[in-house]
Amino acid sequence: MSVTGIRKVLAAVFAGLALTLLSAAPAAAQADKLKLTVAGDGAEGVTIQATYADGRRLDKVVRLVLTATGPDGQRLGPVQLEPAPEGQGFYTTGPLLSAGSWRVKVNAPAPHQSEATATVQARAAQSPPVPAPVAVTAPDRTAGRGAGAGWWPFAAAGLVLVAAAMGVAMLFGRRRTDPQND
């Protein structure tokens, strides 16, 4: 084989290798693309769920960036979001928005370049209703003193009388049956 033939073979090998790598790159890029789901948290915050586009759970920390436009043209952000402890790929802002309708945009940086936009209705945080006052009354000292409630002193007195009667009976009963006393 001549030098020219070796060059042609090497060129063909490198061309095939380049085509293989280039055809695999879009699939790899698609596998790392994120799907971002943006929603309100029911109060003044935003929640974001990030998964891979193919449905796999996010297995690494991605620094998402949030911007928002609110009522009266208010602007917020960019705010860099940190993952929340609630789960993999879950992000939350906490109280960030004022009451009203907000257009929220979340971006993921390269290599996961993704973007999601949603309209979020922020509401003032609700506090739990104040419980109704409970009337506090002093304990009733006469409660339970109806029929049968004060029986134990009488029962105790009856037992003492029965014990005394038995003691007297035993004492006098011994004297009568004792043959030495006759």
Image (cartoon, rainbow, N blue to C red):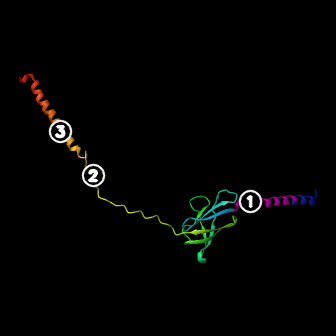
Residue 43 appears in which quarter of the rendering? bottom right
Structural crowding at the residue carrying mark 2, measured as other residues with C-alpha within 10 Å and reported as few (<14), some (14–19) or many (≥20): few
Provide residue 48's location: percent of width, then percent of height.
61, 64
Mark 1, residue position: 28
Amino acid type indicated by mark 1: Ala
Give the residue at mark 2. Answer: 143
- The earlier-in-sequence mark between 2 and 1 is 1
- First reached walking from the N terminus: tag 3 or tag 1: 1
Amino acid type assigned to the residue bearing label 3 in the image: Val
Q: Nearer the viewer, residue 152 or 32?
A: 152
Q: Quadrant of the N terminus?
A: bottom right
Q: Tell me if mark 1 has few (under 14), some (14-19) or many (20+) residues whose alpha carbon lies within 10 angstroms of its own.
A: few
C-alpha separation, residue under disc 3 versus residue under disc 2? 28 Å
- Where disc 1 sits, the SS reads helix
Q: Quadrant of the C terminus?
A: top left
Q: From which residue to which does the magenta span run?
A: 12-33
As drawn, the label of residue 160 is 3
